[in-house]
Amino acid sequence: MTLVIVSLLLYLVATGMLASALRADPGAPSGAWRVPAGAAMALHATVHVIAWNEIHGPDLHFFAALSLVSLGMAAMTTAVARRERVAALAVLALPLAAAMLAAFRAYGHAAPMALDWQQQLHAALALLAYATLAVAALVAVTLWAQERALRRREFHGWLRALPPLVQLEALLFRTIAVGFGLLTATLLTGVLFVENLFAQHLVHKTVLGILSWLAFGALLFGRRRYGWRGSTAVRWTLSAMALLVLAYFGSKAVLELILHRHVV
């Protein structure tokens, strides 16, 4: 419990420091916030490791998975902020990670899942894919807000904390490309390692996951072939991400929180 509280406090401190730094210099905020952010994420990961040791197996129930995905988002946005002018994304990702860690701690541990190394690899790839594509969705929302403000000639102070539209758009598609690769690996390992992938309790997850993969693939093709950008890219990204959320967390919510059945 102590580790959780300290991690939550460090997340809040890091968010406050970053917000203050962005107000002082939106273009090049001080990087001091990364120290408490890094410590918070290290403790966040430690909480999960301890939980796995306590129950002698991986805990990937609904809130545990949410917590791990949010940890991945926080880590990615913090890392990217070192070389891109997107530190503002961490203002959203850090408190989200704190909230998901608190939810995980409040819910408690579920029974460990009997997963062999192949299924653990599949689960790890899935979590990485969801975290990466969730960051892409965050970038897409930021891109939409930036475009909207510029069209309306509403030059808010937060705009100076963001890179130019072209750079932000390039970051969006690089992130989607990485996430698409991870999602492809997730689906392939699912086919290879998960028994009866189209079983009744997995069919919705599988179908929605494939639809999301097709949507992200179509977006990358449209970008390369037709130069899709702007609002078109934002709509495709958010629609594909919505399918992915329904595929994994939607199905897990129904199976685990309502039907009390635990699956990967």
Image (cartoon, rainbow, N blue to C red):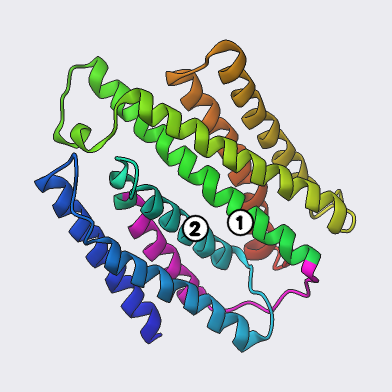
Is residue 30 shown above or below 109?
A: above
Q: Position of residue 205 (x, y in %)?
A: 73, 47
Badge 2 marks a residue whose secondary structure is helix
Q: Position of residue 158 (x, y in %)?
A: 19, 37
Q: CA distance from mark 2 to mark 1?
A: 8 Å
Q: Which residue is mark 1?
A: 127
Residue drawn 36% across and 70% down? 40
Q: Earlier in the sequence, mark 2 or mark 1?
A: 2
Front position in the image: 64 or 233: 233
Q: Position of residue 93 (x, y in %)?
A: 37, 53
Q: Position of residue 107 (x, y in %)?
A: 51, 74
What main secondary structure does the magenta stretch of the protein show?
helix
Magenta residues, start to end: 92-117
Q: Amino acid at mark 1?
A: Leu
Q: Is residue 102 magenta?
A: yes
Q: Amino acid at mark 2?
A: Gly
Residue drawn 33% across and 50% down? 82
Residue drawn 48% across and 78% down? 46
Q: Is residue 245 visible in this depiction of the protein?
A: yes
Query: Answer yes or no: do the residues labelled 2 and 1 have beta carbons within 8 Å?
Result: yes
Q: Give residue 72's mark.
A: 2
Q: Is residue 264 visible in this depiction of the protein?
A: no
